[in-house]
Amino acid sequence: MKSPKEIALEKYFLKLIPSGGSSERLARLLVDDDEVQLLQDHANSVSIKRLGYNDHGPVHMRQVAVNAVRMLELLRASGITTSLEAEQIGTYEDSLDAVMLAAFLHDVGMSIGRQDHEILSVIIARPIMERLLVQVFPDEPNRRVIIASTATEGIVGHMANRRIHSLEAGIILIADGCDMEKGRARIPMTINTTPKVGDIHKYSSNAIDSVTIGHGKKRPIRIDVKMSSDVGFFQVEEVLLQKINMSPVKPYIELYASVQDQDVKQYV
C-alpha cells in the first residue's frame, strides 16, 4: 500500500509531465510498476531499520523526481538546452525521460546496502529501464540506449564522488541534495536513540523547515532553504552545496539559506 505522502507526490509529479507524449506514458509506467515499488520499499527498510539512515525509499525518490522535473522545466523556460538537445542526439522529451528514470531508480541499490549503492542501483536499474523503455519505444533501440545511458550517468553521479558531464545527470545530483527537509529524518530520529556516526546528518536535516525551487533573479533556478536552527547549515554546506559544486548545472543555480528571523545567506 502506498502512503498518503507517496500518492500526493505522484499526483504532483504527473501534473508536471507534458500530457499525450512518451514522457507521460513512461511516468505512469514508473509510478505503477510493482518491481520499482517493491525495490523502493525495501531500500527504505534497509536504510532506516538496518542502517539507521534517513529516507531512501519511495517518498524520497518521488520527491527527487519532482525536484528534477521542476528544475528541467525552469532551465527550458530560460532557453537552456539539455545535453541531448545540444549534442543533437535527442529531444527535450528524451532528456525528461532520462531524468525521470534516474530519479525513480537512483537509490534502489540501498536495498542491498549503503557502500557503493549508486553502482548497485545501476546494476538493478538497467534491466528495469530496458523493460520500461521497450514499452514506450518498441521500434527505436537507439533512442532506448541513449535515454538509458543518460539515466545511468545520473544514478552513478548522484553521490557527488564521480565527475559527471551531462546537464541531465547534473540535475539529478542537485535534485537529490534538495530533499533534506525535516520530514525525511523523522522516522530514524524516532526509532534510533543511540548516538552513532552520521547522526549530524539526521539532526541537521531535522532543522530544515523547507526547500523551495523557483525562478531565480539572475539565474534560471533559485533554491531557498529555510531552517529552524543553525545546525541546518551543515546540511546545506556539506551536502547540497557540495552537490551543486560538482554539477554541470551550477552556472544556472542561485542558492540561499536562512534561519528564521535572521539574514539570508547567499552561496552561489
Image (cartoon, grey):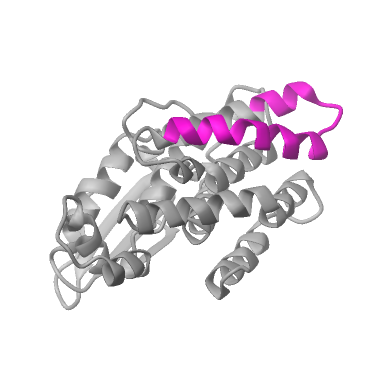
* Residue 121 drawn in magenta: yes
Residue at the bottom extreme, as displayed: 261
As drawn, 2 above or below 268: below
Is 64 on the left-hand or right-hand side of 39?
A: left
Residue 207 coordinates in the image, percent (x, y): 23, 69
**Image position of 39 (left or right of 46):** right
Start and end of the magenta stretch?
118-146
The answer to which image quadrant residue 163 occupies is top left
For this rendering, which residue is in front, 116 or 254?
Answer: 116
Which image quadrant is residue 229 in?
bottom left
Residue 207 is covered by the magenta coloring: no
259 vs 268: above or below: below
The one of 71 and 46 positioned closer to us in this rendering:
46
User: Which of the image's four quarters has the N terminus?
Assistant: bottom right
Compared with 268, 63 (above or below) is: below
Q: Position of residue 21 (x, y in %)?
A: 79, 48
* Residue at the spot 73% in from the left edge and 26% down from the top edge: 143
Could you say where residue 136 lies in the image, as x and y percent from the top left?
Answer: 80, 39
Residue 160 appears in the rendering: yes
Instruction: Identify whether 149 is placed above or below 54.
Output: above
